[in-house]
Amino acid sequence: MKLLRRCTWLLTLACACEADEDPRAPREVNAEVSEHIATVVTVRWSSDEPTIGYVEYGPTEAMEHKTPLGKAESMEHEQLLLGLTADTLIHYRVVTWDGDDAAASDVRTIRTGDLPVGFPRLEVEGDGNDLFTIVPVLGSTTAVVILDPDGKIVWHHRDDRELDFYRARLSVDGKSLLYNAASVSGDPADNSELVRVALDGSESSSVEVPLLAHDFVEHPDGTLAAIVVEYRDVDGTEVRGDKIVEIDPEDGTQTTVWTSWDCFDPEEWPGDSPDHGWTFANALDYEPAEEAYYLGMRNFSSIAKIDRGSGACEWVLGLSAPTFEFADGSARFLHQHQFHVRGDRIVVLDNEGSPGNESRVIEYQLDFETKTATEVWSYVSDPTVYTFVLGEPTRLDDGSTFVNWSSAGMLERVSEDGESLWKLSSPAGFAFGFHTLAPSLYPSDRGKD
Amino acid sequence: MHRALPHACLALLLSSGCESTEPTGSSDDGVRGNVLLRDEHNYESTSSLSIPTIETAPEADLEICWPDATTDIRCHDVAPEGDIDTVALLRFLHLEEDDVEVELTSGELKQSEVDGYLEYLTDHESTCARLSSMTFFGTPIEIEEEYVESEDHTYLLLFATGTTPGVGAKTMVFVKPTASSTNTRVDAVAGCGFLDFSAELTEVEKVRVPEQGPWVIDWRDVTRDSLGNDIVFESIDSVVVGFFEDMTLEEIEAQILDLELIATSMWEVKLEGGRTADLADARGRDGEGSFPGFSRDQEGVWMLALMCSTCQNPSPIVLAVVEPTADGS
């Protein structure tokens, strides 16, 4: 009893000392590792006056990272610490912002958890990468991960459905991660979905989109657009084409904005692998400024630019239904997967165009006047790899190219000169889906993906 | 009791929010167990594979048969018709047969070195299949393009239990498309003799455990597997404790590939992740129920293993000899 009374007295003193503090100061600071994702920490704190603030954090006392500044003044605060590696002691402190750093908590520590069983150990050579990679893992483990620039897993999510995941991207609102759960080997799945998982893993939701194919995008307004397989009866024969379906972010309405039949005739352009379908679209990009989709079609070995409003194909580059000619001496691509259009340049992951089983990246300059595509750059990894499915190149602002060799279980950053700056390899049994890249996992710091 | 008073109040104060808690540099190593495994407790092993090669005609629709696959690479019996669930053809890029053997043994094979994978799921009625019946998850093989004579490629047929790619191989054979060959039949043979595996148990430091629980096994400090590779914590999916009645370490060493067969009793904790496991959660592999503790009237050897059921190399990642003592020290 005596102990309790003395403690009460000391607690009173403690409250008195708080009363003298800056009312903007962060109080009751606590941190918690997500029960769903071992590498995500939620920091919560309160203040006596409405304030905004942020959290400084990192694996060293220097706390190299910080969360974005809170947007609205509040007395109860919550921020996610993202980009953390597993089993790492993290230092952090809360800072209140009032035009300058007004007050700060003491520096505290918390240890992140262990990765779940089944995630691969990734080997990295070189340090020439500065981007986070958001990418599905396929094979022995089916999951979505975010890798930090050093190739370490800093976010992970598995679900038990018997489908594969082919594309992952951070949502435009910065609160969640999106991926497609589908099947592209053999027949497409009736139970395919676009899945949304909160970045702290606390909740997930999904939109049923039957017959999803490889790829989807999210528009700046949150509209989702996905490649969906479409079957039509053509003179008594079932033809497997594709369509682009948009999902309204408000009411979930699904609208077909384009189909293979809008631009192509199966009699004129039958594709080269009828057993696997007709167009067999396998890659989708969206350019908001042009309100245009770019669609890759495996069995056409072609890429089309599609006007979102009219569904018209503005141009086609490739072997089927082309509106561009390849310049003399320029290589053709075969059974390509992803690509990246930047202005009058396009880089293409050419899975099978090179002699032998050797995949490559080819860059073309597009002359829209003469409708000519001229090869201006190409890259083959050393030693060579064969990407028999998927694969994606991304041209970056500094002129380098991020190459995802997907089924070969390799990610690579390559300079303009063809020097391998950074290479990540997975153990046998683990491949990668399509990626997106981000300089930061916080939307305000993300800029152009 | 009186001396404890100021400390108790201090603790209350520290937890009540004057923002002076836990100064920088205070370390939190996470939850630790009371049975700490370290590298010096782990066995060392050496292993090598010698896989036979069969030359065949290139671009040929091979007949692949396995009625003679009556033992696996650990010399355990195999029922060819019932036990072989998957026949897989792996094509390796830039690896010679010797390289494949080394990388399979070490578990260091990279996905980029496997540039083709085809499989045939057996019907358990026949023990033969055609190469043309193999697919990549439904996509059929184009034999003329994918099974060709090549200096850059090495082909390996795996005969496995289960359907997880690369896991559960019972026997295997290299097939080599060779222009001068007219052979179109491949007969897999028994796997016993392919694997040369030895383990060193007698020199390792024993793990001392208290005779009375709790026994929370902690392997955070282990850095290497038995082959000397960096440990991959995410690959450890179970902890197994076993008792080998009336056996010596030398006898166990000599039968190292038969641990599951020669153990008197085994208990297992299945893991979702983490670096600790409480043996209170262990269950008997043969229905013995919960782990009863290390007290035994019989003489024998206790062993503790960290296992990976999906690794290319099925041997334990960590295997330690356990010495129960009164207080674990």
Image: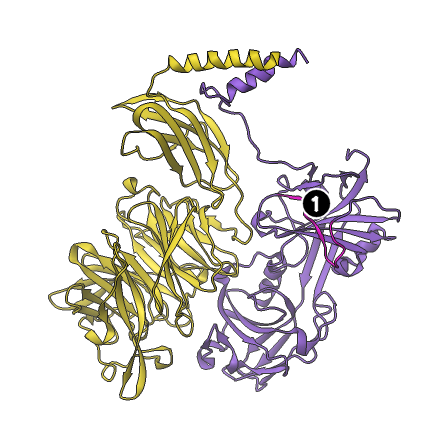
When the figure is inspected, residue A198 is found, relative to residue B12, above or below; the finding is: below
Tell me where residue A140 appears, x and y as whole percent: 52, 60
Q: Residue furthest left?
A: A369
Judging depth in this view, the residue of B233 and B90 nearest the camera is: B233
Identify the hue of chain B.
purple
Asked whether A162 or B311 is in front, the reply is: A162
Toward which corner of the image does residue B81 lie, by quadrant? bottom right
Is B280 magenta? The answer is yes
Residue furthest to the bottom in view is A236
Residue A419 can be seen, yes or no: no
Q: Is residue B179 left or right of residue A237?
A: right
Q: Identify the residue at horizontal 59%, vertical 17% (top origin).
A: B8
Say few, some or many: other residues with alpha carbon within 10 Å of mark 1 (under 14 / 14 to 19 / 20 or more): some
Please name the residue that numbered disc 1 is placed on. Answer: B280
Q: Which chain is yellow?
A: A
The image quarter containing residue B187 is bottom right
Looking at the picture, which amino acid does disc 1 mark? Ala
Give percent across and percent down for residue B91. 52, 70
Question: Circle 1 sits in a helix, a strand or a loop, which is it?
Answer: helix
**Drawn side of residue B201 relative to residue A192, left or right:** right
**Front residue (pair A77, A186):** A77
Disc 1 chain ID? B
Q: Position of residue B305 (x, y in %)?
A: 70, 50
Point out residue B198 in the picture as x, y percentages from the top left corner: 74, 56
Quarter of the N terminus of chain A within the rendering = top right
Query: In this view, which residue lies farthest toward the front?
Result: A1
Q: Does the segment drawn in magenta span residue B5?
A: no
Per the rendered image, the range of residues in magenta is B276-290
Quarter assignment of residue A379: bottom left
